[in-house]
């Protein structure tokens, strides 16, 4: 999967810099990417050193400690990475480059990963420690699409967004009706609300956008927070399911959703 793209939203963090005895040494930008599939959650780290100061800086990087928080402040997981370097950068050379590529499987199930996480990164080098915060966007591989969810809650309701990027063509794929994004809320096995309930969609066949590999489309749906009875959804923690109801294969993503709670 291509790391640098609009959808994949490469997350760049500068963990700081320092000055060594021989020459200025700077840590290159670290690129974090949070990816999920239906069965696993993977955190990837990439960095490239292409100048003498960056090569010196990357050589002194001993370990990286990362804490992952929900946006409400709850600690989700923490891990430590010991970097392994590759490339062509002899210690006396100023012309070559050095690469860092690491990945880690998170213990947290994909369905428990929110659309965004806050990361606190602590880089430990031979010359000191540097800390930086970053927001990590979740990217979910569902069949031929990579999906990036976001949820915006306000006093008047909530907006569900799902950005889709095509990574593989699918012949004969279509939407069987005018419904594009289906949103469902569950709690303890009970379905509390569905955007499709009681809606008469037009029975027209439509293309599943995007159709071109590499292209992106955003789907969105606005909800006022009220159930079919007219009552407000009770405050609590729910499981949110976002579905692109395509045929022959639906695209599905699940994530936690907190409503009416601090």
Image (cartoon, rainbow, N blue to C red):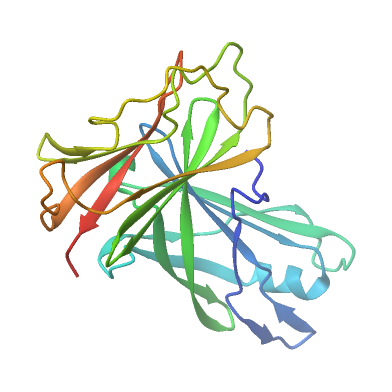
Residue positioned 68% across, 30% down in the render: 213
> With 20 as the anchor, is 67 left or right in this view?
left
Q: At 51% from the left edge and 75% from the top edge, which residue is drawn?
A: 124
Picture coordinates of residue 25, whole percent (x, y): 72, 80
Q: Residue at x 59, y 17 (%)?
A: 170
User: Residue at the spot x=55%, y=16% of the render?
Assistant: 173
Please state which of residues 84 and 246 is positioned toward the viewer in this rendering. 246
Tell me: residue 220, above or below residue 95: above
Q: Is residue 63 above or below residue 183?
A: below
Establish if 98 lies above or below 172.
below
Using residue 50 as the reference point, say whether residue 86 is left or right of it.
Answer: left
Number of numbered markers: 0
* Picture quarter with the N terminus: top right
In the displayed structure, would residue 51 be above or below residue 8? below
Residue 231 makes an appearance in the image: yes
- The quadrant in which residue 154 appears is bottom left
Location of residue 160 in the rendering, given as x and y in whole percent from the top left corner:
38, 49
The image quarter in which residue 243 lies: top left
Task: Say whether residue 67 is left or right of residue 240.
Answer: right
Q: Quadrant of residue 261?
A: bottom left
Q: Quadrant of the C terminus?
A: bottom left
- Residue 108 at least partly seen: no
């Amino acid at each position: 999967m291509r790391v640098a793209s609009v959808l994949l939203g490469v997350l760049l963090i500068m963990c700081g810099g320092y000055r060594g005895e021989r020459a200025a040494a700077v840590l290159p930008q670290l690129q974090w990417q949070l990816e999920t599939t239906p069965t696993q959650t993977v955190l990837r780290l990439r960095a490239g050193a292409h100048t003498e100061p960056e090569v010196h800086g990357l050589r002194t990087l001993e370990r990286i400690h990362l804490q992952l928080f929900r946006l409400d402040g709850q600690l989700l997981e923490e891990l430590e990475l010991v970097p392994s370097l590759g490339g062509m950068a002899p210690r006396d050379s100023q012309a070559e480059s050095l690469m860092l590529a690491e990945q880690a499987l998170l213990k947290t199930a994909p369905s428990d990963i929110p659309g965004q996480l806050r990361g606190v990164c602590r880089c430990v080098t031979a010359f000191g420690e540097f800390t930086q915060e970053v927001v990590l966007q979740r990217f979910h591989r569902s069949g031929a699409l990579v999906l990036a969810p976001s949820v915006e809650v306000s006093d008047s309701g909530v907006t569900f967004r799902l950005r889709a990027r095509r990574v593989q063509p699918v012949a004969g794929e279509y939407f069987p009706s005018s419904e594009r994004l289906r949103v469902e809320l569950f709690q303890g096995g009970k379905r509390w609300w569905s955007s499709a309930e009681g809606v008469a969609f037009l029975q027209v066949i439509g293309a599943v956008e995007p159709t071109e590999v590499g292209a992106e489309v955003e789907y969105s749906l606005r909800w006022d927070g009220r159930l079919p009875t007219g009552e407000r959804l009770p405050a609590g923690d729910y499981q949110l399911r976002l579905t692109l109801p395509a045929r022959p294969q639906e695209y599905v993503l699940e994530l936690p959703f907190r409503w009416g709670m601090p």
